[in-house]
Image (cartoon, rainbow, N blue to C red):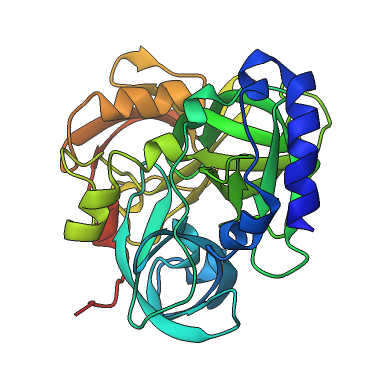
Amino acid sequence: MIARLLSLFVALAALAGPAAAQEKAKPNGEADETLSAIVRVKAKIVPNARSLQSLGPLREGSGVLVREGYVATIGYLVIEAETIEVTGADGKSIPAALAGYDHASGFGVLRLLAPLAGKPLPLGDSRALAERAPVMAASYGGEGVSLVYVVSRRPFSGSWEYLLDSAIFTYPPVMNWSGASLISAKGELLGVGSLIVGDAAGGGTQSPGNMFVPVELLKPILEDLIARGRAAGPVRPWLGVNTEEMRGRLFVTRVSPEGPAERAGMKSGDIVVAVGDEEVSSLADFYRKIWLRGAAGVEVPLRVLQGVQLKDVTVRSIDRLEYFRIKPSY
């Protein structure tokens, strides 16, 4: 199946534009080698996990070998895991541990605790991935390979204090998107699956598809995640507030229990009006104004509407990893 898809890439790339036409598919004999990097990831979450209510106690998705002994996946599958099991292309399952997690990008990296069959995928150049380009979405299992098209490259704002400057949106949607690999015709990793969305093409269109986190965000932090569990440099401040844009206003839909926002008195149903004296009307603007205040630990002044009363609230931010209940890894 993958061999036929790779062959089809060659013909489609010529129609997708000059940059895509330069792609050269791997020979059919190397197709199985490409898929050998795709693994299944299963995680059992610690009983008192902060993410238990929103993400569940048992999580399953895919991952991809990116180094000997290391698997990249989408972080929400494995954060706060008590145990992690990785299954290779040969069906063998082995234990793994969370090596590193990066909230800014959403990536998680696993350290395999025993040898696993499969050859790591090289990291490609997701910056060169243009709209209309044909790519392959691969998740664990023989039927988990699909030919998809990039339909949009644009910013993505998530309600959970998450922002990507240039996410990859693809069509048609694949159902096993969590941790799925977006692979070029050359057999290089371009992105890791995060979400299913209803507006993949953007512009308010009704176009179901998937959002992939570009591999360019993994490249500069991979070695740090492996060596020290997190990216180097200052840590972004985290408030513990979920917010949605509606009619030009930012409505608080949830505050994390015992998190900074809740401790400061914020509640679901509040409307965020400003950061300090600067008004905000979009998630991206809200996040950027918070992050410009400094690193985790900085106090963030907010103006919020609670009912009919306008209040000034100061939230002392934290490092989000401090909030999670992460099982120690030895």
Instruction: Identify which residue, 199 or 243, lies in the foreground.
Output: 199
60, above or below 5, in the image = below
Residue 48 shows up from this direction: no
Q: Is residue 238 left or right of residue 54?
A: left
Instruction: Identify which residue, 222 or 15, lies in the foreground.
Output: 15
Answer with the quarter of the image where residue 101 lies. bottom left
Q: Position of residue 127 (x, y in %)?
A: 48, 25
Q: Position of residue 279 (x, y in %)?
A: 41, 15
Q: Position of residue 167 (x, y in %)?
A: 54, 32
Q: Residue furthest right?
A: 206
Residue 117 shows up from this direction: yes
Q: How many marks?
A: 0
The quarter of the rendered structure image containing the C terminus is bottom left
322, above or below 150, in the image = below
The quarter of the rendered structure image containing the N terminus is bottom right
Answer with the quarter of the image where residue 206 lies. top right
Residue displayed at 46% across by 66% down: 51
Residue displayed at 65% across by 23% down: 20
Residue displayed at 50% across by 31% down: 126
Q: Is residue 113 left or right of residue 88?
A: left
Q: Position of residue 277 (x, y in %)?
A: 30, 14
